[in-house]
Image (cartoon, grey):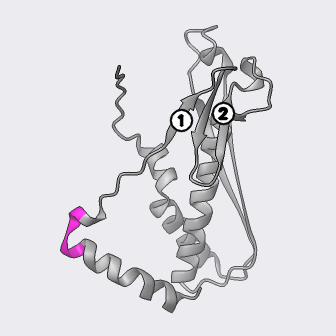
Amino acid sequence: MDATALKALQAPLKEAYRDNAAKALVTLRARGTLDDQSIACKVETGRALAVAGLHPATGGSGLELCSGDMLLEALVACAGVTLKAVATALEFKLGNATLEAEGDLDFRGTLGVARDAPVGFREIRLKFDLDTDEPRERIDSLMKLTERYCVVFQTINNKPALSVSAGR
C-alpha cells in the first residue's frame, strides 16, 4: 500500500470521526476462561485459542504462554503496524525493519516474597532496527510519530483508568 491508497482508505473515517466523535469510540474486548486441569487461562484471540499459564520463574511448565510475553508481543505488534502506517503516510523509504521489546521483571513481587519488589515490569525497552537511507531528521520524525500513535505504547506509558468487578 502506498501513501495515496492509505490516505484514501482513512479519509472517510477521519471525516466521520470529525463530524461525530462518538463514532470514533470503539470498545475492544478480550475473553478468557479458566482451564479446569491446570493453572491456566484460555484466551480467545479471534483467530485461535491462546493458553496462558504461569511463567517458569513462578512455577509454570513453560508450555503455556506467559502473559508478560504476550504484553511485550502486543507492544511489538502495535508498534510495528504503527511504524509501517506512519512510514507509508510520510512516504518514508523503509526497507526491512525489526522490532524488539524486552522488559525486566522481579518475580519476588509476583510471588509475594518481598513486599518492596514491584509486581509487574520495572522497565520496558522497545528497540527498532531500521533499514533506511533517510536522513536523521526523518528517522526522528518517524520514531516520534510511531511513539505518538502506537495505542499499546501510549496505554502502557499513560496508564488508563482500570477497574475490576466480579459477578455471580
Image x and y of residue 151, in percent: 47, 56
- Tell me the element at label 2: strand
- Looking at the image, residue 22 lies above or below residue 67: below
Say which amino acid is labelled 1. Gly
Provide the residue span drawn in magenta: 18-22
Q: Residue at x 68, y 55 (%)?
A: 127
Mark number displayed over residue 32: 1
Density class for disc 2 (Cα within 10 Å; few <14, some 14-19, many ≥20) is: many
Which of the 4 image quarters holds residue 44? top right
Image x and y of residue 168, in percent: 35, 19
Density class for disc 1 (Cα within 10 Å; few <14, some 14-19, many ≥20) is: some
**Foreground residue among 86 and 2:** 2
Q: Residue at x 65, y 81 (%)?
A: 135
- Tell me the element at label 1: strand
Q: Is residue 15 left or right of residue 86?
A: left
Mark number displayed over residue 52: 2
